[in-house]
Each structure stands twice: as structure tokens, then as C-alpha cells.
Image (cartoon, helix red, strand yellow):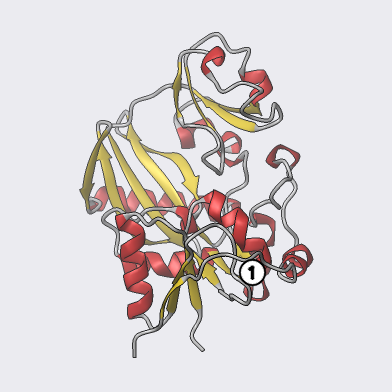
């Protein structure tokens, strides 16, 4: 049986392209109608957002790679081009100045400029211990997405220019600078990851890291992006030793506590019985 890529109920145009590339490669795709796992379903990989991933990956024994939650804060200022501070949202509520605020590795908080901490979701909507990144407000003249595999750029795309969507290949000078950045940061990241970089005052700096299994491809080579996606969300049995420290935290545990899944936790989670749900859409591998 060929490996299976699991997909969520609703797909973006980018996810549809990833599905097509997966099937063209000879893999099976399964699109679930809900976030519940049908009885007896098996899958080795997934491509979806964090909420769906947290609902299904543990029971399937899929190890999902991502950057450490404080990765951006830990980078030197010359690498990110701005001040970035990680703090519990409890502390961010007290801020009285504008800042760009986001959650490190999920969409629990809308990433945007907040005029001050009073504009953030309150305790009725978010756990006070939720970790957020508070960044100095800057404007990038151009923004680029890099799908990185084993410390090299596997495929890439420009996705914005002066804050507006703009899809294009990377210029040669940007490619060279981006490749050097990825090479220098390789040891701080999992082997398969997406890194967004941008031009700030004519200098290429890191914007953020994103999980490849949850990232859009923009104008990247979709088949090469799929290489990164499959590594970034794959069977725990195939997890590289270097990547064990970069697995997504167990749902319900706080990222601010730095608790990650261990290999044994992932293996144990895969034995949990799934709940009943409507039948999924199965698209067998092409022959």
C-alpha cells in the first residue's frame, strides 16, 4: 500500500495543488469531512492547519515538526532586524504601545498590529499563560517563502511586495542571501521547515518560521514543496533523531512550558481509539 496524506474538510487552492502533486507521485490522499477520525483509518502524513493537526496527528502517530516557540526571540537582532520579545499574553495585556503580536506556532491569536494590549483577546477567550511574540513594527519591501530541507532551500517563492500579494521567483541576489541565512540557521530548526524572509532597509532578515505541513506554497514548485511537507509530518518511526526536539507539543500542554512530544508519547497516542465520523473522501494513488 502506498503512503497516505490526510487532508482537512476544507482545502485552499494551495492545498488542492498539494493533493494533486501527492496523487501524481503515487500516494493516496484522504480528505476527512470533519475533525473526527473514522474507525480504522490510517495515514502516514498530513497537510493541514494546526487545529486539525492537533485533533488527528497524535492518534495516527504522525510526528509534526515546527520551530521552537521562542525561536524568533532567540535570534540575534541583526538576523531579524527588529526587537522581538516572547511573553505570556497575561503580560502582553499590560502593554500600552502599538506592536505586532502573534502566537508562535498556531492561529489561536490573529497576527496583526495591536494599538496596545487592551486590544488583545481577554481571559474569556484565551488562556493567560498563552505564549505570544511581541515585535517592533516594521515594513518589509518584499517578502519571500523558503521551503527548507536539510539546511538548504528546496523551493521558494516571493509572496508580497510592499505589503501587497505579489507572486514571483526569487531574484538571484535574494536567493544567494536566503541560502546563506538558511545554512546559518539550520542547526536551530527541524530538518523540514518553512522560513519566511523579507527585505528590510535593503537587507534580508527573518520574518518567521512556519510548519511546512501547514504552509501555502504560493509560486513555489509544488512537487518540491511536497518533499518538505512529507518530511515535516511523517510517521514517528521515521523521525530523525535530530528532529525529536522539534516535534509539535502534545495538545493541552502549554508551549510556554517548553513541553514537546517524545517518541514514546507519539507511539502511545497512536493506540487511542478514534471516534465515529462520516466517511472520508479517498483518492487512491495513480497508476
Asked if one can make out residue 156 in the rendered structure from this viewpoint, the answer is no
Residue 127: quarter of image? top right
x then y, percent, for residue 215 = 42, 53
Question: Of 24 and 206, which appears nearest the observer?
Answer: 24
Residue 261: quarter of image? bottom right
| Left or right of residue 250, residue 101 in this image | left
**Residue picked out by circle 1:** 60
Asked if one can make out residue 242 in the rendered structure from this viewpoint, the answer is yes
Q: Residue at x 66, y 70 (%)?
A: 236
Q: Secondary structure at mark 1?
A: helix
In the orientation shown, which residue stands out farthest toward the top? 96
Q: Residue at x 32, y 57 (%)?
A: 14
x then y, percent, for residue 104 = 56, 39
In the rendered image, the vertical position of residue 150 relative to residue 209, given as above or below: below
Q: Residue at x 39, y 43 (%)?
A: 197
**Where the C terminus falls, by quadrant?**
bottom left
| Left or right of residue 75, residue 8 in this image | left
Residue 223: quarter of image? bottom left
Amino acid at each position: 500500500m502506498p503512503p497516505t496524506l490526510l487532508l482537512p474538510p476544507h482545502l485552499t487552492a494551495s492545498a488542492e495543488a498539494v493533493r494533486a502533486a501527492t496523487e501524481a507521485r503515487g500516494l493516496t490522499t484522504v480528505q476527512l469531512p470533519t475533525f473526527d477520525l473514522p474507525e480504522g483509518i490510517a495515514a502516514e502524513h498530513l497537510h493541514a492547519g494546526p487545529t486539525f493537526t492537533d485533533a488527528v496527528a497524535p492518534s495516527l502517530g504522525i510526528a509534526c515538526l515546527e520551530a521552537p516557540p521562542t525561536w524568533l526571540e532567540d535570534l540575534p537582532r541583526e538576523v531579524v532586524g527588529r526587537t522581538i520579545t516572547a511573553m505570556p499574553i497575561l503580560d502582553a495585556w499590560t502593554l500600552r504601545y502599538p506592536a505586532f503580536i502573534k502566537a508562535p506556532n498556531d492561529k489561536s491569536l490573529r497576527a496583526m498590529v495591536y494599538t496596545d494590549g487592551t486590544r488583545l483577546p481577554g481571559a474569556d477567550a484565551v488562556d493567560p499563560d498563552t505564549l505570544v511574540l511581541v515585535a517592533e513594527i516594521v515594513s518589509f519591501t518584499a517578502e519571500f517563502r523558503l521551503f527548507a530541507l536539510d539546511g538548504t532551500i528546496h523551493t521558494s517563492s516571493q509572496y508580497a511586495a510592499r505589503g501587497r500579494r505579489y507572486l514571483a521567483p526569487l531574484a538571484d541576489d535574494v536567493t544567494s542571501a536566503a541560502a546563506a541565512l538558511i545554512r546559518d540557521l539550520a542547526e536551530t530548526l527541524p530538518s523540514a521547515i518553512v522560513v519566511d524572509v523579507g527585505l528590510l532597509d535593503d537587507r534580508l532578515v527573518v520574518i518567521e518560521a512556519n510548519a511546512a505541513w501547514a504552509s501555502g506554497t504560493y509560486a513555489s514548485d509544488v512537487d518540491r514543496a511536497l518533499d518538505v511537507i512529507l518530511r515535516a509530518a511523517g510517521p514517528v518511526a521515521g523521525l530523525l533523531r535530530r528532529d525529536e526536539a522539534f516535534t509539535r507539543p502534545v495538545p493541552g500542554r502549554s508551549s510556554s512550558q517548553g513541553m514537546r512530544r517524545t517518541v514514546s508519547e507519539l507511539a502511545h497516542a497512536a493506540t487511542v481509539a478514534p471516534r465515529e465520523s462520516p466517511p472520508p473522501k479517498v483518492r487512491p494513488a495513480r497508476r
